[in-house]
Amino acid sequence: MNDTTPRTMRAITQDVLGGPEVLREAELERPAPGIGQLLVRVHAAGLNPTDTKHRQSGLFLGNPPFVLGWDVSGVVEETGLGVALFQPGDEVFGMLPYPYGSGSHAEYAIGPARAFVRKPSAMSHEEAAAVPLVALTAWQALADVAAVRPGQRVLVHAAAGGVGHVAVQIAKSLGAYVIGTASAAKHDFLRGLGADELVDYRTTDYAEAVRDVDVVLDPLGGPESVRSLVTLREGGLLVALLPIGVPELRAEAERRGVRATGMLVEADHAGMAAVARLIEEGALRVTVAGTFPLAEAAKAHTSLETGRTTGKLVLTVR
């Protein structure tokens, strides 16, 4: 242990499942990096819908206590045995391994060295903390799973949301023609990110208005996944980001002559490096909808659950 590193840390934890009120600030033992790991002094940590779902239901993590948070931006405090990519003092950002590597809503977090890359110098920690989970999700869905090519038509649902507004930009960077669904009030925002065509889901049925799409990025799940299949051209692909009920969805897709698959985001050094390059080239920016001090995590959860945020919410830690 670094002699100057505190042995304890502030963290947001919970003892029971439930609403935002179950979150509390606590003094916990500071984790120590193991083989191939980094100990990161957290400056900012992103908040995602999956945090609220885990707070409510335990989802993949089971019963509390646990510390939520997968997005992290900060400074390397210590390196574990075998780490060659980084050294103490490096500014890094990344996504802790999803789902079992959570813990960024604290003053210190540990994760595999290859879950991180160097933070672009032009970004603040608050901006960088908003990036990893949503950008990796969009990159893995569009570049890896769908292998989007120039000229293809991509439909992005909930295009102004955390994943959606990043997916619009990544799809454009891959040369796609991008169609997004969002309320009319958010259309100017999305045009500024490069969206070619927008559908106001409140007044227009996308299932009737959109056709001949090569790829659908679907964070909605449920009945909307099935309805979205009609927008695909023959052989087109729907990537569901809520991989529940995927066998039934695949069967319906096959019946219609299209394809469907589900995915969960993975910690990914190569993906994070690609995302960092897009940021440095000016092809990708993540909108921070608001920031909250770590101690006000419950307020941040409440704000996120309104469903009205455009972009990402971030907890400031240091």
Image: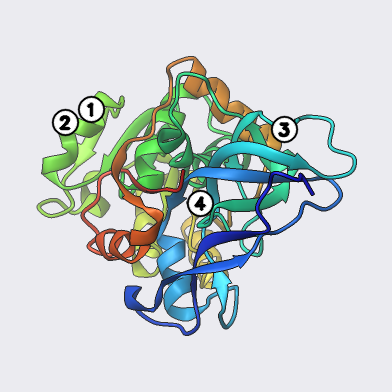
Mark 1 crowdedness (10 Å alpha carbons): few <14, some 14-19, many ≥20:
some
Q: Which residue is mark 3?
A: 88
Distance (Cα) linking label 2 and label 1 = 5 Å
Mark 3 crowdedness (10 Å alpha carbons): few <14, some 14-19, many ≥20:
some
Residue 188 circle label: 2
| Three-letter amino acid code of the residue under disc 2 | Asp
Q: Is residue 1 above or below residue 270?
A: below
The outermost residue toward the right is: 82
| Three-letter amino acid code of the residue under disc 4 | Val
Do residues under tags 1 and 3 come within 8 Å of each other at their CB atoms? no
Q: Which residue is mark 1?
A: 191
User: Which mark sits nearer the N-terminus, 3 or 4?
Assistant: 3
Q: Is 256 displayed left or right of 108 in the figure?
A: left
Q: Is residue 172 above or below residue 49?
A: above
User: Which mark sits nearer the N-terminus, 1 or 3?
Assistant: 3
Q: Picture coordinates of residue 196 (x, y %)?
A: 27, 27
Distance (Cα) linking label 1 and label 3 = 41 Å
User: Which mark sits nearer the N-terminus, 4 or 1?
Assistant: 1
Nearest the viewer among 313 and 147 is 313
Q: Which residue is mark 4?
A: 239
Q: Is residue 150 visible?
A: no
Do residues under tags 4 and 1 come within 8 Å of each other at their CB atoms? no
Q: Is 192 displayed left or right of 21 in the figure?
A: left
Element assignment for label 2: helix
Element assignment for label 1: helix
**Residue sitting at x 72%, y 32%:** 88
Please state which of the two labelled residues, at mark 1 or mark 3, is closer to the viewer.
3
User: For residue 310, what is the image quadrant?
Assistant: top left
Do residues under tags 2 and 1 come within 8 Å of each other at their CB atoms? yes
**Residue sitting at x 24%, y 25%:** 192
Distance (Cα) linking label 3 and label 4 = 39 Å
Distance (Cα) linking label 2 and label 4 = 26 Å
